[in-house]
Image (tube, grey):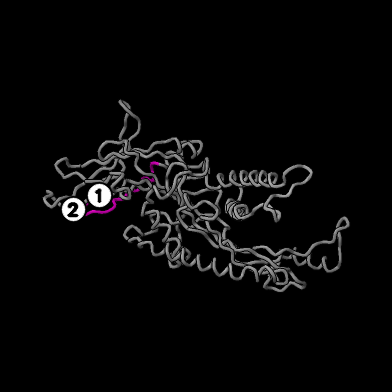
Amino acid sequence: MTPNWGITFGLIVLSLFWLVHGVPVKTKSGKHRKDSQGNFGDLLERRQENMEGGLETKLLNVFGLRELPKHGRKQFETPSFMMELYQSLAEEKNQQARTTATRQIKANTVRSFFDTGRGRKNSFVFDLHGLLPREFVLSAELRLYVQKEKENAKKDTARVNLFQISGSGTRQQSDLLETRTVHITEKGWLVFDVTQTFLSHQKHLAAASLLENTTMHYAIEMVDESDNELRISRRRRRNQDRMPLLILYLNDTAIRKNDILTPAYMDIHGEKLQDGAGEEKEENTSGKRRRRKRSTSSARRSNTRSKKCQLYEFYVDFQKVGWSDWIIAPNGYNANFCNGHCPFPLDPHFNATNHATVQAILNTKDFSLKGQRIPKPCCVPSDFDSIHVLYLDDYNNVVLKEFDDMEAKSCGCH
């Protein structure tokens, strides 16, 4: 049975959140209480370390990481294309467009790879480290930023060939992928569809995971040698955001939902990024939300036991969990939780299952099993929503992944 990584991720986040804020019980003197077996504080500390270690292992499996990234995102510039894609998914109008469109090819993971810089002029090499065995390529595109040619260019356009390079030395082979006419007097992104180079790999390889050890090599060549050459941005320090990019749209088979449109159905190449306004607004909103929760948390704790089954707001802050260095966006999310009792008879708004209804009846009739009374139905989430997470992997590649069942949207008695 395939594990539900969305539920797993959600449980890990919530568990680590409580572990981070949980502390061993202390006496008035400030020292941990001791029992007959030794220092109770040390025992709790060891148990907490073991729990965190187990949760960290599960977290690595969910994200497909070998270890938690130790690099900081402050030292790394997120490709504007990836941030733009993430923001487009967060917009409500795009959500409606995705649900109404038909015959769409959708992904649940997008991986970006920077050019390694090992290729010659107008030659681009990408190491595909970080791909998971459970991920399969749906679509791929090569993105090259063309700088504006000087005013004395011979002509405005030029024809270029795109090749895939395989082998090395005397066995090197060039396969023509596309011929295109390019406006060399205009600057901007030149995007090539290179999906076929990956589909052929997946067709002949036993597992898609073998792609991880593959190096994809592409080259641009002028059809007419007399034409001005394309000025493609490649400098890492000055123009990191304009470096050549390889974008893979993937299907992670461990994730049920697919919301990310492949290039044939989306048009975000010409949109401009907001000047951080959206992110700042999100931070301010979450801050207000947290302040509101703090002011009402004590009141909620005092009366939640007497309330019927319902949904409560709960915001998970990735910075407090300790993941803000490698999770780029969002800053956190509303996990929410369900709490309250399931009264008999169960009203329709409790979304009770037939099983829960029967169990509630048996509870009122004092039915017992092995001397224990059959309990009332439990108040649990009945409807979930997914979230998209933009993060850095082990190799400084920016990844956008969708996670199922992360936000509790409604509750029911089950």
Outermost residue toward the top in this view: 170
Q: Nearer the viewer, residue 162 or 11?
A: 11
Q: Amino acid at mark 1?
A: Val
Q: Which residue in the protein does label 1 denote?
A: 146
Q: Position of residue 102 (x, y in %)?
A: 45, 62
- Which residue corresponds to the image point at 50% horizontal and 42% vertical from the top-left? 132
Quick one: SS at disc 1? Answer: strand
Decide: few, some or many residues near mark 1? Use Cα within 10 Å; few <14, some 14-19, many ≥20. many
Instruction: Look at the image and say whether residue 12 sits in the magenta stretch.
Output: no
Which segment did they paint magenta?
Answer: 180-197
Above or below 23: residue 71 = above
Q: Earlier in the sequence, mark 1 or mark 2?
A: 1
Q: Nearer the viewer, residue 374 or 20?
A: 20
Left or right of 398: which side holds 229?
left
Q: Position of residue 285 (x, y in %)?
A: 48, 67
Q: Nearer the viewer, residue 270 or 276?
A: 276
Quarter-wise, where is residue 119 in the image?
top left
Decide: few, some or many residues near mark 2? Use Cα within 10 Å; few <14, some 14-19, many ≥20. some
- Which residue corresponds to the image point at 32% horizontal and 61% vertical from the top-left? 272
Q: Position of residue 146 (x, y in %)?
A: 25, 49
Q: Which mark is residue 201?
A: none
Outermost residue toward the front in this view: 29
Quick one: SS at disc 2? Answer: loop
Q: Amino acid at mark 2?
A: Thr
Q: Nearer the viewer, residue 292 or 220?
A: 292
Above or below 101: residue 112 = above
Q: Which residue in the protein does label 2 denote?
A: 185
Q: Position of residue 205 (x, y in %)?
A: 47, 36
Cα–Cα span, label 1 and label 2:
9 Å
